[in-house]
Amino acid sequence: MKLRAFATTLFAALIACASATVDHDKIEPIPQPEPVTISEKAAIKFKPQLSTSNIACVFSCPMENGEYQDLVMWEQLTDAARAALNNGDSFGKAEVPFSDEHFEDHLAEAWPL
């Protein structure tokens, strides 16, 4: 009986989330500091996009002035987040591009010619 109630509640919540709408005029970017380091300047070149499963096209997400929202900078992460991303044991054999050990190499490969 509890499983049926849980399933019904979950289904109702999913339907409510799927039918929710957002007024695009209400979306505002998060203020970001001016870029100083190489990684911060590289992050600015990233152009984020917004897409949903309910819409067949992809929307670019510029701010009102035409600029794009910056990514979270390495220096803005907490000490715990930086330690977790630098811990090779957290990701197995994967070369995590955020780790100090691999970041410069990955950045050099991604840098435009």
Image (spheres, rainbow, N blue to C red):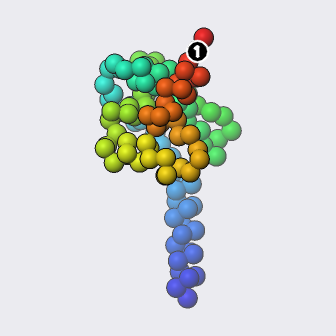
The structure residue drawn at horizontal position 33% and vertical position 48%, both measured from the top left corner, is 80
Hey, which residue is sitting farthest bottom in the picture? 1
Residue with the mark numbered 1: 112
| Residue 35, percent from left and from top | 35, 20
| Residue 24, percent from left and from top | 47, 35
The structure residue drawn at horizontal position 52% and vertical position 72%, both measured from the top left corner, is 9
Between 71 and 101, the residue placed more toward the observer is 101
The structure residue drawn at horizontal position 51% and vertical position 64%, both measured from the top left corner, is 13
Q: Can residue 56 be seen in this view?
A: yes
- Horizontal placement of 55 versus 17: left or right? right
In which quadrant will I find the N terminus? bottom right
| Residue 107, percent from left and from top | 52, 24
Note whether 13 is above or below 42 in the view shown. below
Counting other residues with Cα less than 10 Å from the Cα at mark 1, is it few (<14), some (14-19), or many (20 or more)?
few
| Residue 79, percent from left and from top | 31, 44
Between 21 and 79, the residue placed more toward the observer is 79
Between 63 and 113, the residue placed more toward the observer is 113
Tag 1: amino acid: Pro
Note whether 3 is above or below 97 in the view shown. below
Q: Is residue 24 visible?
A: no
Note whether 7 is above or below 55 in the view shown. below
Between 100 and 45, the residue placed more toward the observer is 100
The structure residue drawn at horizontal position 54% and vertical position 26%, both measured from the top left corner, is 105
Identify the element where label 1 is drawn: loop
